[in-house]
Image (cartoon, coloured by chain):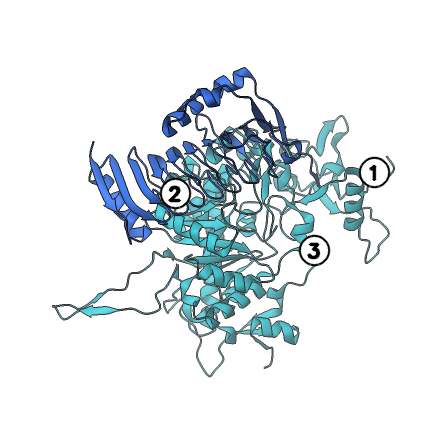
């Protein structure tokens, strides 16, 4: 008791004049903030995580949530968060875990990049009138094509083409595992990508039977835990992704706590109920780039060379050289997950301090692969902190072929980024396995929301391209001339290989 | 029984695997591979009940993701035989490399001689799927690390000193390991514990001892009438106490 109570993070107040005592807030709050007594609704405000479920369900706008109503003495170095982390670790002696992505106030590079538009000298294109080509193919492209003339005076292609994924928009949904998120959340996203003609990742938790109807739009993941991985799983996926690392926690493995391993999750992951699902930090059959090649080829051999194989790494200092190794491993795409990538739970020290931003990583990887003449060997998929269509356009200008979104898709289903996914109490039915909470998420409605979001962003991308006088996504890819840096220093401009505004 | 013989001399692994798949489609129930010299991925992702007999030394990831077939190797095997294997049997009349039976989910792997580092690492089990790795010789460090299920039996037939390799079963949270004789206490990794195997334990693993003896023509009593050490997890939640929430 030396440290004692801390100020509440959020204060919840119920306006008694507005409240009609319907009790929906009590019913909906999975964190136990509300209760009823003879004076009306009473709040235990310290339990609040600001998930806003109560606000969304209150018919009378009676609820207000304020962040940090009582603060510490302000100090630029010893912030409330810093102090509270010390309190917790002083009391427990343990590693600090947090949910969602990087919460440290680093500058956001995307917000220092501006896009171009046509004026006078070359006309912009109206996407309403002209076809805009957003279709994207992910996978190896041949260096050259060889043909032979046939006897009907036509030509036959003799170059063997590698399998590619055909995306109707360069937006995919990244890997969030069943276990970390609910089956309803997975189903909703699977429906959305199937209808749009794009893809989503299964995460490392296996592929639930309920998702088999959408398997042609699912990328199955093989992570270090190899959960749910068998030849049936590999054959079901449209592509296979080897997860080496994750932007939210580069260099370390993952532990799905036993509480989240319910009967269904246990079945999909193929591990006993209630057991921790531990993904080791490395794949223990990959200790070198040569070993990675062996895993890539083993997956291709197992699926008779019919599936593209992706390799996902966290964006770290030497991301460009590592990606060049991946491009030579036989992989068809490299996924770069920037340091803002989301997570259900990660040690905060990793989440906030390890890795580099996606913008710099993509630019560096694209430049390195082009320099080595192997850019065609792999597609580049950018992920980690993609918030809006402008981020996608900018990522593509920096060299990405497509992006993975993650948190944005969850927000489309109601997520408020409260960052407490690890507690398994998600009141929106997203990051939980509790049946009563999962039931709150209607997969059909949620699918519609996710679909709307991807559709809207695709429209915006087409508008941005049209304004820049570009009618094909291929002409935007790696098109640094369409970007300018705003308030970036010379060294950053060099890494991104762009000019400053005005130049 | 339909037997097909494939001469693997000078053949790359992809055409070799294609020939194996074609042989199965043609109704082969036994495939003999001759002159195998380092071809990787033999039997990778193969399903069904076929038997593959290998003369020579197969390369890495023998029987990876395999679901059902039996592979018998008259020679040594390289890196990670039985990697993420689902069902079936691999019998190696020789030694095998690192990460033997890595992440194996089901089926059985028998190795007559020694295995390399990280044997049986992250093996797991689910319901009736319980992988078994039986080693006639000894194993290098990190045997059964992160093990989440399954069974490892090691006879150390040529050794009498206590087993002394680091990182034994560190992070183990399921399954069990039996080692003939004793082990040095310091070999045990975090989360594992060791006790003398009981007669009930020995009775439980007896079918695998007999099967091993049968495959390699060894007198079973030599292996049955011995003392074993059983290594098992302390908890199914080895990391439960490591973290606090933000």
Residue at the disc numbered 3: A104
Mark 2, chain letter?
B
Name the image quarter holding the C terminus of chain A. Answer: bottom right
Task: Respond whether the residues carrying marks 1 and 2 are from the same subunit.
Answer: no
Q: Residue A475, position in %: x, y? A: 42, 71
Mark 3, chain letter?
A
Identify whether A316 is placed above or below B33: below
The one of A117 and A139 positioned closer to us in this rendering: A139
The one of B216 and A49 positioned closer to us in this rendering: B216
Identify whether A327 is placed above or below A495: above
Please name the color used to draw chain B: blue
Residue at the disc numbered 1: A5
The one of B18 and A485 positioned closer to us in this rendering: B18
Residue at the disc numbered 2: B62
Mark 1, chain letter?
A
Return the disc, 1 or 3, that comes first in the chain's sequence: 1
Please name the color used to draw chain A: cyan
């Amino acid at each position: 008791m030396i440290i004692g109570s801390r100020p509440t993070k959020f204060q919840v107040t119920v306006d008694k004049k507005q409240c009609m005592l319907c009790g929906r807030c009590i019913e909906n709050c999975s964190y136990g903030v509300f209760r009823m007594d003879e004076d009306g609704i009473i709040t235990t405000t310290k339990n609040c995580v600001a998930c806003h479920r109560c606000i969304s369900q209150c018919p009378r706008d009676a609820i207000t949530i304020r962040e940090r109503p009582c603060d510490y003495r302000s100090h630029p170095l010893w912030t409330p968060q810093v102090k509270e982390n010390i309190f917790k670790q002083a009391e427990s002696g343990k590693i600090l875990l947090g949910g969602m992505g990087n919460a440290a106030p680093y500058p956001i590079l995307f917000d220092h990049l501006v896009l171009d538009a046509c004026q006078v000298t070359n006309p912009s294109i109206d996407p309403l009138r002209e076809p805009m080509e957003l279709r994207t193919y992910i996978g190896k492209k041949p260096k050259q094509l060889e043909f032979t003339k046939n006897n009907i005076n036509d030509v036959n292609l003799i170059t063997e083409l590698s399998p590619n994924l055909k995306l109707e928009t360069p937006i995919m949904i990244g890997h969030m595992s069943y276990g970390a998120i609910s089956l309803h959340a997975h189903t909703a996203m699977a429906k959305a990508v199937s209808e749009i003609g794009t893809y989503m990742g299964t995460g490392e938790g296996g592929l639930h039977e309920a998702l088999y109807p959408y398997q042609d739009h699912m990328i199955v993941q093989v992570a270090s835990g190899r959960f749910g991985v068998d030849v049936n799983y590999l054959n079901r996926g449209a592509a296979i992704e080897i997860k080496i690392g994750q932007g939210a926690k580069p260099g370390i493995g993952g532990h799905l706590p036993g509480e989240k391993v319910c009967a269904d999750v246990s079945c999909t992951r193929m591990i006993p109920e209630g057991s921790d699902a531990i993904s080791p930090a490395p794949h223990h059959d990959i200790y070198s780039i040569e070993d990675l090649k062996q895993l890539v080829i083993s997956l291709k051999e197992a699926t008779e060379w019919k599936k593209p194989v992706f390799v996902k790494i966290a964006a770290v200092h030497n991301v460009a050289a590592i990606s060049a190794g991946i491009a030579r491993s036989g992989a068809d795409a490299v996924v770069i997950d920037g340091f803002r990538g989301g997570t259900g739970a990660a040690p905060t020290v990793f989440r906030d301090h390890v890795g580099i931003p996606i913008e710099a990583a993509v630019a560096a990887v694209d430049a390195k692969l082009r320099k080595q003449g192997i850019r065609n060997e792999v597609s580049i998929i950018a992920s980690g902190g993609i918030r809006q269509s402008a981020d996608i356009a900018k990522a593509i200008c920096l060299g990405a072929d497509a992006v993975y979104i993650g948190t944005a898709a969850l927000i489309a289903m109601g997520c408020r980024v409260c960052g407490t996914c690890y507690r398994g109490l998600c009141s929106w039915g997203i990051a939980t396995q509790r049946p009563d909470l999962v039931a709150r998420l209607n997969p059909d409605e949620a699918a519609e929301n996710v679909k709307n979001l991807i559709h809207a962003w695709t429209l915006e991308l087409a508008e941005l391209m049209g304004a820049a006088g570009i009618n094909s996504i291929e002409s935007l890819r790696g098109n640094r001339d369409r970007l300018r840096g705003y308030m970036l220093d010379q060294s950053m401009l060099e890494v991104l290989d762009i000019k400053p505004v005005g130049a | 029984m339909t037997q097909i013989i494939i001469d693997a001399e000078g053949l790359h692994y992809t055409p070799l695997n294609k020939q194996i798949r074609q042989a199965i489609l043609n109704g082969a129930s036994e495939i003999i591979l001759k002159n195998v010299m380092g071809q990787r991925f033999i039997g990778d992702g193969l399903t069904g009940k076929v038997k593959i007999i290998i003369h020579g030394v197969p390369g890495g990831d023998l029987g990876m993701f395999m679901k059902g077939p039996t592979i018998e190797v008259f020679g040594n095997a390289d890196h990670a035989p039985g990697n993420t294997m689902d069902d079936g049997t691999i019998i190696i009349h020789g030694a095998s490399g690192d990460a033997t039976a890595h992440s194996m989910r089901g089926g059985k792997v028998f190795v007559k001689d020694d295995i390399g580092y990280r044997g049986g690492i992250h093996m797991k089990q689910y319901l009736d799927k319980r992988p078994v790795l039986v080693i006639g010789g000894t194993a290098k460090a990190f045997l059964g690390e992160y093990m989440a299920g399954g069974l490892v039996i090691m006879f150390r037939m040529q050794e009498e000193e206590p087993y002394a390799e680091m990182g034994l079963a560190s992070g183990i949270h399921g399954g069990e390991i039996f080692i003939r004789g004793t082990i040095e206490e310091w070999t045990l990794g975090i989360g594992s514990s060791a006790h003398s195997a009981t007669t009930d334990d020995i009775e439980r693993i007896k079918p695998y001892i007999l099967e091993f003896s049968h495959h390699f023509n060894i007198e079973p009593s030599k292996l049955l009438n011995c003392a074993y050490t059983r290594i098992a997890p302390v908890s199914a939640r080895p990391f439960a106490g490591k973290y606090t929430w933000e």
